[in-house]
């Protein structure tokens, strides 16, 4: 009889170890440190220095972008070249400001003469930017999609003053232009059928992309709100569960002390059924605490910085079904062993300590989840 009781005692402590190993995360561990790559000895600082433009005799030909000079739209392709007087686009001279305002080429490019201004302008036009001549004769480069908002205002109908106001609002970069100059730019602009036909599909695609971005942003905002609400619920659930578990464990110790048993008799068997009821009560509580642990783990994996310490749980972290099955299998096997030995004092003590560990884990989850959603 003694070897059988010894085996049962060992099985109860194995069940205790399995239950203690079942928590899927220790929410305190940081992510693995990111690898730091050494800085390259040389890196191009300007994007147009790394592109081979279609160049012939110093003339670069670009088929994209928009060019509006003197209020008139120039049809592509755009032949960009430099001479002693400056930069020319399709034979018309382009005057750039000496200081950098708007989104023109950088200030350091003006120190090397007109030839150094050709490649930056060609690169901007390749990115579907717009070269716009201001009323004072200087030109600015409006990048994508700012140029589409500007063209939409120029091609729209309405009073010139209203269109000039909208045009000034569509360019977020402050420019040294007065309201009269904006209105003069609007009045001097001549809309052409070629520009309207080319602008229409681009504007529709841009509006579609803008709607899709707005929908994605709204979906992310709704998901963030749901995640925050779920986190608050789990915080309150963790606090309530930990307090309830500690109170139940204190009550269980009081009731266990009333069961006649000599100190140190781990193999003592209670035939009255009182110890079995205590073990059953704590096993049910153990399942509830494990469900809370699983819910907190599934919520925390959505945040950057969560590190799963359980190696098996780390492999199954991307699969909710696999993670749930892994958790349920371990807890089920452990609770079956504890219930099979529920009349023994060793099983009661083992269940008591496992519940205490999960109560502390619930408090840790409550503090960690509050940091995640804050």
Image (spheres, rainbow, N blue to C red):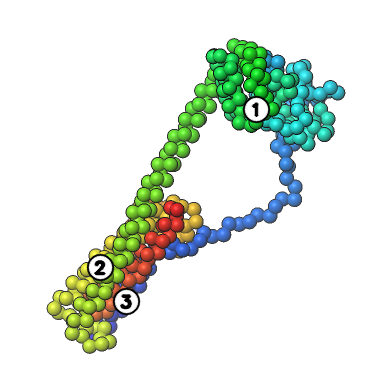
Q: Quadrant of residue 366?
A: bottom left
Residue under circle 3?
Answer: 13
Tag 1: Cα neighbours inside 10 Å, few (<14), some, or many (≥20)? many
Q: SS at mark 1?
A: strand
Going 54% across and 60% down the picture, which residue do you hit? 32
Residue under circle 2?
Answer: 283
Q: Which mark is residue 142?
A: 1
Going 50% across and 30% down the picture, which residue do you hit? 210
The image position of residue 40, as x and y in percent, is: 72, 50
| Labels 3 & 1 near each other (Cβ < 8 A) | no
Q: Nearer the viewer, mark 3 or mark 2?
A: 2
Q: Earlier in the sequence, mark 3 or mark 2?
A: 3
Q: SS at mark 3?
A: helix
Is residue 272 left or right of 185 when viewed as pictured?
left
Q: Nearer the viewer, mark 3 or mark 1?
A: 1
Above or below for 312 versus 178: below
Going 50% across and 56% down the picture, which residue do you hit? 305
Is residue 98 left or right of 333 when viewed as pictured?
right
Q: Residue furthest right?
A: 84
Above or below for 218 versus 201: below
The image position of residue 317, as x and y in percent, is: 42, 55
């Amino acid at each position: 009889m003694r070897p059988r009781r010894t085996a049962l005692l060992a099985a109860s402590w194995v069940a205790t170890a399995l239950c203690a190993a079942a928590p899927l995360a220790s929410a305190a561990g940081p992510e693995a440190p990111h690898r730091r790559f050494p800085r390259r000895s040389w890196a191009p600082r300007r994007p147009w220095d790394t592109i081979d433009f279609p160049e012939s005799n110093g003339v670069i030909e670009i088929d994209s972008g928009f060019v509006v000079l003197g209020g008139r739209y120039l049809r592509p392709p755009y032949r960009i070249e430099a001479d002693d007087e400056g930069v020319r686009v399709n034979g018309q001279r382009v005057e750039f400001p000496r200081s950098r305002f708007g989104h023109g080429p950088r200030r350091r490019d003006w120190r090397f003469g007109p030839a150094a201004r050709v490649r930056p302008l060609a690169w901007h036009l390749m990115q579907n930017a717009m070269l716009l001549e201001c009323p004072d004769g200087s030109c600015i480069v409006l990048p994508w999609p700012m140029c589409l908002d500007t063209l939409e205002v120029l091609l729209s109908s309405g009073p010139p003053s209203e269109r000039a106001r909208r045009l000034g609002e569509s360019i977020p970069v402050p420019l040294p232009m007065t309201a009269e100059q904006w209105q003069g730019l609007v009045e001097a602009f001549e809309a052409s059928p070629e520009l309207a036909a080319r602008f229409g599909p681009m504007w529709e695609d841009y509006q579609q992309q803008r709607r899709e971005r707005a929908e994605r942003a709204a979906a992310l905002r709704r998901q963030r709100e749901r995640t925050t609400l779920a986190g608050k619920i789990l915080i309150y659930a963790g606090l309530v569960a930990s307090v309830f578990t500690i109170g139940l464990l204190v009550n269980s110790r009081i009731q266990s002390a009333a069961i006649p048993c000599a100190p140190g008799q781990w193999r003592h068997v209670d035939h009255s059924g009182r110890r079995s009821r205590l073990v059953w009560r704590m096993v049910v509580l153990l399942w509830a605490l494990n469900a809370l642990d699983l819910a907190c783990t599934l919520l925390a994996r959505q945040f950057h910085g969560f590190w799963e310490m359980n190696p098996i749980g780390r492999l199954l972290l991307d699969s909710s079904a696999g993670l749930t099955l892994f958790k349920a299998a371990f807890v089920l096997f452990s609770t079956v062993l504890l219930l099979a030995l529920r009349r023994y004092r060793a099983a009661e003590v083992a269940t008591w300590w496992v519940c205490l560990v999960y109560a502390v884990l619930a408090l840790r989850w409550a503090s960690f989840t509050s940091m995640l959603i804050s």
